[in-house]
Image: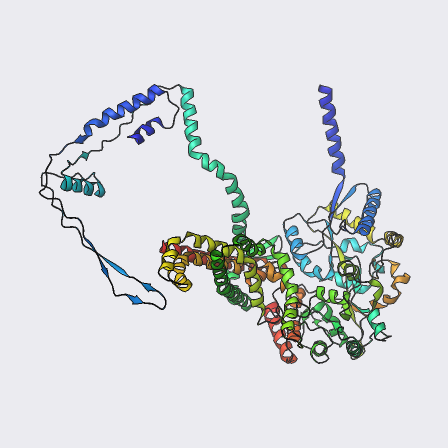
Amino acid sequence: MKKIVFLLFGLLLCNSLSASNVIELVVWNMPPDADELYKKIWDESTNNFQIKNPRIKIKGISREYKTQEFVSVMASGKGPDIVRIPIVALPSMSKYGFLLKLDEFTKKWIQKDYMPAIMWDSVNIDGNIYGIPYDSYFTTLFYRKDIFEKCGIKNAPNTWQDIIDISKKINSLMPEVKGIALPPDMFYFIDFIWQAGGDIYENRKINLNNVGVKKALNFWHNLKWKNKVMPPQNILDNYDVEQFFSAGKIAMMVGVAKRLPVMARRYGLDLKNVEIVPLPAGETGIKAWHVGGEAFIINAGITEEKKQAAWEYIKFILSPPYQLWKWMKMKELNMIIFPGDFSCATNLINMPEFSKVKDSLLYARSEPTFYKWNMIKEDFNKYVLEKIFITQNINLDELLYNFQKRIESEYYE
Amino acid sequence: MSDNILNKLGGHQLSDDAIKSIIDEEIVSHKKEEAELPIIKLKLPPKEPVITIKKKKETKLEETTEEKVQIDFKPQEPIVELPPSIKLPDTMTTLEKLRAQYRYKRFGMPIKIIRKKPVVEKPLPDLKKQDLKKLKFLKFKKEFLGMELLLPAFIIFLIFSWLPIIKTFLISFTQFKTIDNSIYVGFSNFIRIFNDSKFWDALLHSFSLSLIVILIGTIIPLFLSLYIYEVKTGRGILKILYFLPFLIPSVPAAILWKWLYNQGFGLINYLISLLLPGKEIHIGWLTNPDLVLFSIAFVFIWKNIGWAILIYLAGLNNIPKVLFEDTALNGGGILTKIKHIILPAMIPIITIVVFIQLINSLQVFSEIYIMTNGGPEGASEVIATYIYKKAFFYMDIGYASGVAVFFLFILVSITLLRANLQSRRT
């Protein structure tokens, strides 16, 4: 009897010792079971990583970043060890101490110099790196090839004026179809500000009362009220726009390629009918769009050992061999490959699939990394962009002046 | 007497003999407590109280005639005083004194004075130590049984209801630099509220929404409940039909209504355009700042109409039917019934519905978050969405907690007002 007890005790001790050697990393963003193919790739890549790093065990959780959830779970101290969050969320999350500074890791990272400077800019907050870009997406213009063909339009719009002309032509030939729909969202509007030659972030201060902003605002207002090329709804959210585009009620929309599979799954969009082109240039011929996507972050509240393990995992996922394996696997599984789906820290940008957007990085810009930017954006959407879509007769100078005054009193004093 | 016996028994399991002996002792101890007084007969019994009914002038209403009666109650003639030899002891209650007086004067019955003697604690019959322990335990168990049963629920209530409130209250005095670094700022979050124009806008929108909900959401269910009360067949089906929206979760209901309200392709605008052929109708139910609160209020009323009807029906069922029958016999119509019977009887119920609608509509969140997210131009930003955005979007957790506490005080004041009104009425 004694022997059995000793044996059991010994086994338990061995088990606990071996368990203490294994570091378990909790990683969000695991694809849901419904996304069978993506889930398959995740499972295989996780297995490959665990074989190479037997001391590290990955515990995947199928959960996407949502501000409230993320803040709550991080504040409770039970946040994930690694998670991908939108690049635009980095400033506020780093401000509240959720994110680990990654400068020490990136200094020694061999792939560091492969990454375009613009991508590093978007994760650099006050001189510190808080995230590693996972994918890189640009705002682009989607258009419906079938509608363009029906209307005999051969070229995609290159300028703002082209958008108006093409939209009018489409609407005259197909009265039930409108040219373009734009949601009152600074995420898309900021590209138009840059295209109009304006900028909004100087000396760590947001200035939205300038000529560029006014020109862009005037263009959007005219699309709605003067040229009447937008749907009758005053305010459309992103989902409305995606649905209208999928249903063929609008011919063009501004978006990121990453949304296309979602639109295909949710609204039955036939991807064969969609073409992706860079955003048209502004009045002065300036091409500009902004870079987005997600970045890997590491929880600042975990142990040193876990931080190191988390960095190993990120390095593995962003490594050229893994990215190439993923590309081959996606081909093998007949999955649709979108530009931006792969890390810009690799040479995969030279693959033939990405030829159309290869030069996009040259014109790409990043949003301000000022932590109150998200709040100002929200206010701008609500008090300026919604206003121009609701009110036909409006004084844009006065609107911008009042808004600037408001943000200065609320966010700078 | 029985109380004394029970006290002595103390709920213990005693033998039959022990109980019998205690009862016998009690009977003997009370026998001499009654003192008989001399019988004095009165000359004449007092007159019966006279009640006369005077008919007032008949006043003719539009359709019905009502008889108003006034009852003149003549007070009883003065009671003959008791002879000075008879003094009623102070130990008697006023009611006992009056009864004794009446019996004495009316029937010449003797006045029995019951002198309450201090109850002498009798020693318990000999019990074994084990039995005593058992008895003590049983007594303790009997006294604390309710608490035992309540404790788990109380703890859960404390953790999930009061702890967050206390925590929010504490956070409202702080400002977060980072998530694990907060500083005490005293009342500055509360002072900030008074200078925050967005907060006052949101509060105004909340109360405007509540006003619409109260005005429409109290009256329509009342009439619908009257209809259901009067209808003879299909009452159950009607109740279910009206109650169904209440069972739909807020999120799908809000998504559904968002599509119905869609400015370009929504069903509501389509139906209106059918009524006005040749015209394209694109009313911005959710995108027009002047309309948005009405649209949201309508969804709220639609969703909550079921329970309001049920509460009203419960109130209507409590009104004695004989009143309706009387009114009907006297030729009273539905308006008379509503004005003179239903409304007076239903005022407490209406008050309850008004206050519940007020509190619920002040707390509305999911409908607004999904349908408009506070837009357009912040026209539907209410307190709940404002707190949410301040906490999780603007990351101003200390201030958001301050606003939440301030708002809690407003809600508590409303609840106390309701309780005060109800207690005054009762």
Furthest residue in direction right, as rendered: A352
Horizontal placement of B377 versus B334: left or right? right
Q: What residue is shown at x 19% (from left), y 41% (from top)?
A: B97
Horizontal placement of B164 versus B23: left or right? right
Rendered image quadrant of residue A236: bottom right
Front residue of B237/B191: it is B237
Q: Give the quadrant of the N terminus of chain A.
A: top right
Front residue of A126/A15: it is A15
Instruction: Give residue B290's position: percent from left, percent from top.
Output: 57, 72
Relative to A57, say whether A219 is above or below.
below
Relative to A235, say whether B8 is above or below.
above
Q: What residue is shown at x 23% (from left), y 28% (from top)?
A: B30
Instruction: Give residue A405's position: percent from left, percent from top.
Output: 61, 74
Asked if residue A362 shows in the view, the reply is no
Instruction: Give residue B230's position: percent from left, percent from top.
Output: 47, 57
Front residue of B373/B352: it is B352
Q: Give the quadrant of the C terminus of chain A.
A: bottom right
Asked if residue B249 shows in the view, the reply is yes
